[in-house]
Every structure is written in C-alpha cells, then in structure tokens.
Image (tube, rainbow, N blue to C red):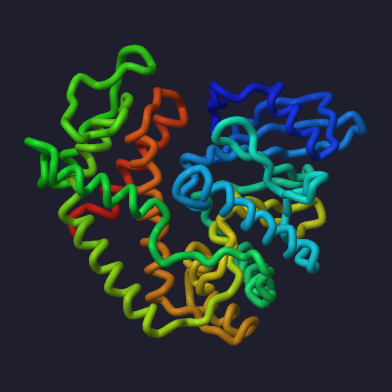
Amino acid sequence: MRSRPDDLTDAAVAEALRRWGIEARRLEYAPVGFGDHHWRAKGADGRRWFLSVAALDSKPVSGDGAEAALDGLRRAMATARALRDAGVAAVVAPEPARDGETVVALGAGYALSVFEHVEGSAGSFAQERTPAERRATIELLASLHRMPAPPRTPRIPWDPPARATLERALGELDSAPGAARSGGPDAAPDAPRSGAPDATPARSAPGAARSGGPYAEPARAALAAAAPRLRTVLAGYDRQVAELVEERPAVVVTHGEPHPGNLIVAPDGQLRLIDWDTVGLAVPERDLWSVVRDDADLDLYERLTGHRPRRELLDLFRLRWDLGDVGELLGWFRAPHGRDEDADAGWRDLAELLRRVGGEPG
C-alpha cells in the first residue's frame, strides 16, 4: 500500500519489534505491495528486516472479522515457518517472536509479522512470464505441492474470499428504493474527479454503503450495472463447485498467489516465494492458473508430480480470483474510506473487474 495507516505510528511498530528482541535504529514506511502495509527496519546489530502489518478488518483471505483473521493469519504464517524449517528453501518465512508466535497483535485491528531482509529483485503482478520463467515457477510449485502438509495448514474453501460481502452488496441492490438493476457495465459512473480528498460524491442511494466515502456510490452503481450477469456467473460457479465437492479431488499445500510480484530472484538466480498469508490446502490448480500457458507447461507439471492439471479447474480458479477481488474491493468502498493513491487504484481495479466478470458474454 502506498498510503500508510493514519492510526499506526512508527513508535508503535518499533515497540512491537521488541517482541522479537529487535531494537530498531532505523524504521521507514515502505510503499510497496497491495493489501498489507510494510516497513523496513534496521536493528542495533545491523541486521535488516522487512515488516508486514495486516489490517485485520479487511483481511477476508484470512478470516471474516478481526478475531478470525488473526487466527487465520497465525495459522498461515506457522505453515510457512514449518515449510521453511522442513527444508523448502524457496519459502521466505516469518521469524518467530521470543514467545514463538509468528504473528503479533499490534494495536486495535492490526497484526505484525517480521521477515529477514532478502536480497534480489521481484517482478510485478501483471508481468507476463517468459517460457523459462514459467518453467522455473512450475518446478518451484511442484516441489511445494509434493510436501506433506504441516499440522496448522489452513484448508482453503471453494468460495471466493469476501463472498459474503459480495452477496450482501448484491442483496442491498434489491432492497434499495430506486436502485438501478440493469444496464451494461459501461453505464458505471466515473470516479469522483474533484473536491477535497475525502469529499463524497453528490449522488447517493439508500443501502449504497454503511458508512461510505468518495467511492461508495460509484462502486454501488458499477455493481448494479454488472449485477444481472454477475449473478449468473456466481450460479454457474456454484454448480461447478458442487460437482467438485462430490468428486473430492486430492489437495496439496498451495501458496495461493505465486504471481511474479511475489517471486524474488536472488543474486544466485534462485527463486524465493514471499507473502504466505494465502497458503492453504487446495487442488494444485489454485497455484497453476496464473502460470500455465500451454501444453508444455501441463506436461512439465505432470512429469514432476504425476498429476495433469485440469483446464476446467484452471479456469475455475481464475474466476475465483476475480470474484474474490470484487468482494474485497466492494468491502473497502462500503466501509469508511478517503481518497488517496490506493483508493484510486482500487477503484480502477474494481471497474475493470466488473466489466470483465459482470459484463455481457461474448
């Protein structure tokens, strides 16, 4: 996130670092990534650290609500630590605090994880991989998928993250007097263009959001435009999942988001995989949908694991990703929010997702 949280000071972060025995001599906010907040720190002994701070009320991938999200995040980080301790060198795992916890509650609604600084360069989320990069990533994932699951590994539900938020937002469209319920995705309004950063748009509708902010009404109207097709997509998703539940396919330890932005190329050329808050038991296709591009990729994974990825599952998890992002972004804009670089980027992402997922077929 490019914008740091207003209610979390460097002093509070530095104090929490003492749980790890780290006396921070330098601490700076790092405007990188999306979702969590990050700091870079240097201890009195000269060691460098990378800090990840999760806002628990907006962490649906870990759990619904702050308490559930903290528990889910602790299980995920414990899994990453166990994998690293078991010899999976590619895992960039959190360091345990003095009490053994890998995640420490930080103030009201935040949680801190601490990672040793890793040298190397990372890509970006939307970066297209070369065939050689795909091969290296598939080899890494195959080695992960062959590992026995650590005891605290979360089980990933078939439902997309923030599905409940998406369903609530769709339900409120039906109950809001005069709410728009049809029209193509191009009918979605523009983002607010002027006024103070926290100014709300002039238009509003009952049920648009519980608290609101500058993107509350644009998000509601964009959802209303996409709602008919989006409901059809959700129904089709649920039918496919129901068939899979009956089938009970084998599950493995998956990372969840092995895109180029979460892969660091170390100086020795080895890949290191970061951001393990999404780790969990699922079918291999949960990791592979963003990597596989052709039959050669499928052949390679099959040679390494004995399992040939199924194209219908690759497509299902591509859709699950998009639906989860829609729900998470709607949750953001239904809650109190201001306008900054992160909100502007989130709005652009939501508008594009609703056009892609909720647009007219064909």
Q: Residue at x 23, y 65 (%)?
A: 235
For residue 12, which quarter of the picture?
top right
Q: How many marks?
A: 0
Residue 221 seen: yes
Q: Position of residue 54 (x, y in %)?
A: 58, 40
Looking at the image, residue 298 sits to the left or right of residue 21; the answer is left
Query: Which quadrant is home to the N terminus?
Result: top right
Query: Vertically, is 341 above or below 91?
Result: above
Residue furthest to the top: 196
The quarter of the image holding the C terminus is bottom left
Quarter assignment of residue 360: bottom left
Expressed as whole percent of the image width and height from the top left, the position of residue 353 reads 33, 48
Tell me if residue 200 comes above or below residue 317 in the rendering.
Answer: above
Q: Residue at x 78, y 42 (%)?
A: 117
Question: Residue 130, can we see it?
Answer: no
Whether residue 40 is situated above or below residue 131 in the rendered picture = above
At x 33% / y 47%, what residue is drawn?
165
Image coordinates of residue 248 in percent, x first then y, are: 44, 82
What residue is at 24 percent from the left and 53 percent from the top?
358
